[in-house]
Amino acid sequence: MTVMISKHKFFFASAPKVACTSIKTEMFRVENGFDFRPFHANGHYRHIHDNAIYPAAPFERFSHLDFSGYLKLTMVRDPVRRFLSAYSNRVGYYRELSAEALGDDHLGNGIIPNPSIHEFIDGLSKYRNASGSIRLHTEPLKVFLGSDPSFYDQIFNIRKIDQFDKVVSDWIGDSFSTPHLQTGGEKIGVSELSVSELKKIRKFYEDDYELFGEYFE
């Protein structure tokens, strides 16, 4: 999920559930001078992550581009908290694992519609296979940010988003203030997970901890 603004020589690589909708919405305003609103064209719904706007893209899609003179930034989030946010928003709020969303082809075979967080963790691989959106929102950070942290001029923790806004504002010479979007869903604390559940999630994201762990605190 990337943003390149050539007139400001600015590049931002984002991952789902790391304020990506919020940041890209503000990026659109900076690039175009007006606020983004979802719209329809030729019967197709266009949202901020649409391929024609700021697409959901793995790092490999843009890694070959020339970024000479560009400010290259990204943002990370502790993988366990990011995972819980993905569950709350996509499963709890948007009901992307409801019986209707899953369809007959994916029901049964151990898949429980509208799973609890515990059922979701237990059947994670099945739920990721059953839903493209769930797979996208739970992919490791390295899929979107790459495996070389030194590529970026700065890496921010989501809890330091104010610092990110200031760096962007200074670079583009204009006010940049990230809104707070995609807040739907009941919040789940890390304390609600068992030791084995935490271990499973951390194992799934072990590469992210190795690559970006110093930025998670």
Image (cartoon, grey):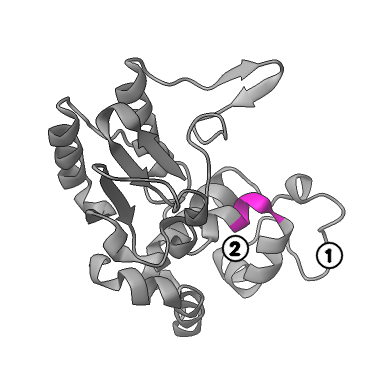
Amino acid type for the residue under numbered disc 1: Gly
Residue at image location 63% in from the left, 24% down from the top: 45
Q: Position of residue 22 (x, y in %)?
A: 37, 37
Q: Tell me if residue 183 can be seen.
A: no
Q: Is residue 162 left or right of residue 28?
A: left
Residue 167 position by quadrant: top left
Residue 14 vertical position relative to residue 141 in the rendered view, above or below: above
The residue lying at 43 percent from left, 39 percent from top is 182
Label 1 crowding class (10 Å Cα cut-off): few <14, some 14-19, many 20+? few
Q: Position of residue 18 (x, y in %)?
A: 38, 51
Instruction: Find out whether residue 17 is within the magenta segment.
Output: no
Residue at the image position 69 percent from the left and 54 percent from the top: 131
Which residues, given as a range, are shown in magenta?
131-135
In the displayed image of the protein, which residue is found farthest to the right? 104
Image coordinates of residue 165 in percent, x first then y, are 20, 39
Secondary structure under tag 1 reads loop
Query: Left or right: where does residue 191 sit relative to residue 201?
Result: left
Q: What residue is shown with label 2?
A: 116
User: Which circle marks residue 108 in the picture?
Assistant: 1
Q: Is residue 185 above or below residue 200?
A: above
* Type of amino acid at the residue the image marks with label 2: Ser
Q: Nearer the viewer, residue 161 or 181?
A: 161
Residues at marks 1 and 2 touching, judged by CB atoms closer than 8 Å: no
